[in-house]
Image (tube, helix red, strand yellow):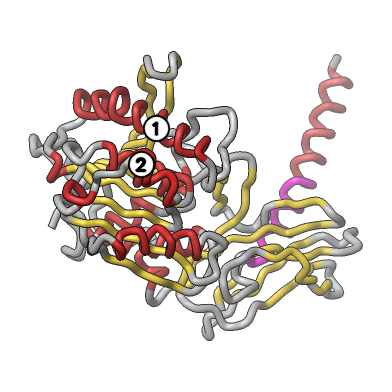
Amino acid sequence: MKKLFLFVAAVCFCFSASAQEALGSRAQVVSPQINENNSVTLRLAAPEAKKVTVAGNFLTPDGTPVENTEMVRNADGVWEYTSPVLRSELYNYNFIVDGVRICDPSNVFICRDVASSFNIFIIGGDRGDIYSVNDVPHGSVTKTWYDSPTLQTKRRITVYTPAGYEKSSQEYPVLYLLHGAGGDEEAWMTLGRTSQILDNLIAQGKAVPMIVVMPYGNVFGSTPSPTTLAAAKMYQKFEEELTECVMPFVEKNFRTKNTRENRAIGGFSRGGGQSLFTVYSNFDKFSWLASYSAYLTPEVMDIYFPDLQNDIKSLDLMWFGVGTSDFLYQNVLDHQNYFDQKGISYEKMFTDGGHTWMNARTYLAETLQKFFK
């Protein structure tokens, strides 16, 4: 028995020494390294790998991810890549090692997008500072469940409350913030950096302290094309879910101001379409509307909302944002043209780039400074 114990102890010691050696080797690899000129150097220790490439949204001007940028291996078996100079922004990336996609083991900042995970880094100095965790008062994030009689199930929801919420009796206006077809109720927190953006803007006096409600937007097994009437039926079902289940739950469990002047709604991609449909169906409940890279077709407008001209003028804000390289760019313009023809005014913002979270974050930061003012 004593010999067995000594053998096991020896094995454990060797394993521990080997693990420490591996950790020590890994600790020597710095990745990502933000350089003085705002380029970034990525590194990966993989001496046995035959080919390593980097995939990331910083490799093209419009933020579209690419996967064919090769890294170079040095004599120590560390693969390395240095980017061009980058503008201030939040970026994501993966390594692809001999065809297998992995996260950077030297970077603890990992972001999940439903079934995908990737690393992130931030170039500071401008937009990136708004997405960073800074020395300001921080709000809280609650992840919980609620009953949905509309869908006959329990559903997940994420709620941001501003700094000081727990220690006060104050009531707050509410923004309902909706994710796109590929996301879930955590997307606006992880990919959208909602809590960081609001913490910073509130601290700077640029945004009103507010509660942000981020529900799970999938109500069907799949998402119909936004050009079809099937999409409108999906939007309608979500509108019922939001107004009949989500809003009563939020207003019962959080200190909210429950008038239309104190409710806003906004969303990215499919979430933008859901936002538009919900407000056009409920002018008595919402006064602030923002659509990020989204639209409703003229056919849907004519069928579901033929008489909205007078009601829509009661909104304090109707706002559209879209990238000029977005594959939905022309559809968004067509939706805006629908209002142009009826003499209905709105605010708009065009940016470079495509259907990306880079643009979605930009639109969110812009509209947060407009809501409830």
The tally of labels here is 2
* Dot 1 and dot 2 residues touching (CB under 8 Å): yes
Tell me where residue 178 appears, x and y as whole percent. 39, 43
Image-quadrant location for residue 283:
top left
Q: Main secondary structure of the magenta part?
A: helix
Q: Is residue 114 above or below residue 371?
A: above
In the image, 140 versus 56, the foreground residue is 56
Distance from disc 1 to disc 2, alpha carbons, whole Å, reads 7 Å
Q: Which residue is mark 1?
A: 236
Tag 2's secondary structure? helix
Residue 90 lies in the magenta stretch: no
Q: What residue lies at 47% left-to-right and 33% top-to-bottom? A: 234
Asked if residue 131 lies left or right of residue 243, the reply is: right
- Label 1: how many Cα within 10 Å (few below 14, some 14–19, many 20+): some
Span of residues in magenta: 18-31
Amino acid found under the numbered disc labelled 2: Phe
Image-quadrant location for residue 179:
top left
Residue 115 in sight here: yes
